[in-house]
Amino acid sequence: HSGESSTMRGGKAISIQGSTFGIPGVLEHTNFLRDLHQAEAIRSKLVDNISKAGIPGRPAKEKQTLLDIVIVGGGPTGVEVAGELTDFIEQDLKRMYPDRAKAMRVTIIEAKEILGTFDYSLREYAAQKMSKRGVRLHRGIVQKVEAGKLTLQDGEEFTFGLCIWSTGVGPTTFISSLPFAKTGAGRLVVDSHLRVLAPIELDVGVTHIPREKKEEEKFSILAEEKATEQPLEIVPHMYAIGDCCANPSHPLPALAQVAEQQGRYLAASLNYERYDPKEMPRKKLTPPGEFVYKSLGNMANLGGYAGILQLSRGRPGVGPLSFSGLVSWLAWRSAYLTRLGSIRKRMLVAFNWTLTLIFGRDMSRW
């Protein structure tokens, strides 16, 4: 939208993007991984760097920089990318270019804990498994990113030919421009019914929201989902679901299953608001109450036909069920197929996996 203002008579905020936390050089020198276009750009750069590293006469330092891959963010996405890369190096690149495969280095940089949403035993299993396969795990906070070099706050530097930025999601310019209450991480503050909240001094009855361009807000990479301490009130007919919002009392992870459950809850809430027993005497609707998230479990693919799986028991005070190894990897792949939406897509993906298993990955340039 390019106008100076927009009229909002009600709706839900769904705008989100990869978070840079205001760190200099992230947009210019790193690759995000949130859609197919970005994935193709990463593949193209990886194949290009491998080809450049094989040019005769190239200095050893330049060659090593081209073959260094740094992944910023140790969540499920970052770990799974590292796992796929190590599979590619061991199963495909080692067969075609053994010298370049031996020189390749994959590093994960995480500010907090690797796979922090999993329990301790699974995090330890994943760290040991990945370290054994040659992935370097490093804890630190990025200070700046330059062309081919990343610097941490403690002064340590990492060179790279490819840097993948996978630190999670952050607010877009649109979300940041809204005058409603925000958490420390920049997400919209909602209540237990997913209604957007705003400071009391703001006239929330006004439907004309200014859309002025503002300088990008900076949020801390270690920020907690705490709301402002000033009194808040409900914005009429305004809801938010998914990654762009958080309830400070019960912050939830930025996962697809959270957004899906919130979407179903919001649909039920809106249907009840428009429900009229006189017009629909045969249909009885009840108010949905407060939103309650029910975790379906967490999974991550570590590569090397290994994975981790954490399932909720569904009872308060009872720890989750934890699995690791080949069984978890098979469960991860099975769950992935079931979420594709159509039988055609499931068959195409399964067929592609089978071809990769038999013939290896395609390293040609597109």
Image (spheres, grey):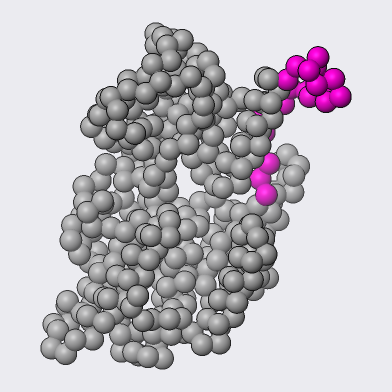
Q: Which residue is drawn at 51% across and 51% down?
A: 116
Q: Where 363 falls versus 106 (above or below)? A: below
Going by the image, does 244 lie left or right of 155?
A: right
Is there any visible trace of residue 88 in the rendered image?
A: yes
Residue 69 horizontal/vertical position (percent): 32, 69
- Between 203 and 183, the one lying in front of the other is 203
Residue lying at the far right of the rendered structure? 282
Q: Is residue 282 magenta?
A: yes
Is there any visible trace of residue 131 in the rendered image?
A: no
Within the image, what quadrant is residue 66 found in?
bottom left
Q: Does the magenta stretch include residue 222?
A: no
Residue 21 horizontal/vertical position (percent): 31, 42
Residue 16 horizontal/vertical position (percent): 42, 41
Q: Which residue is drawn at 31% across and 89% down?
A: 99
By secondary structure, the bulk of the magenta-drawn segment is best described as loop
- Between 243 and 283, the one lying in front of the other is 283
- Between 229 and 15, the one lying in front of the other is 15
Q: Where 63 falls versus 257 (above or below)? A: below
Quadrant for the C terminus in the image: bottom left
Quadrant for the N terminus in the image: top left
Please provide the residue range marked out in magenta: 275-296
Going by the image, does 356 lie left or right of 229?
A: right
Q: Which residue is drawn at 81% across and 14% down?
A: 278
Residue 255 horizontal/vertical position (percent): 54, 47
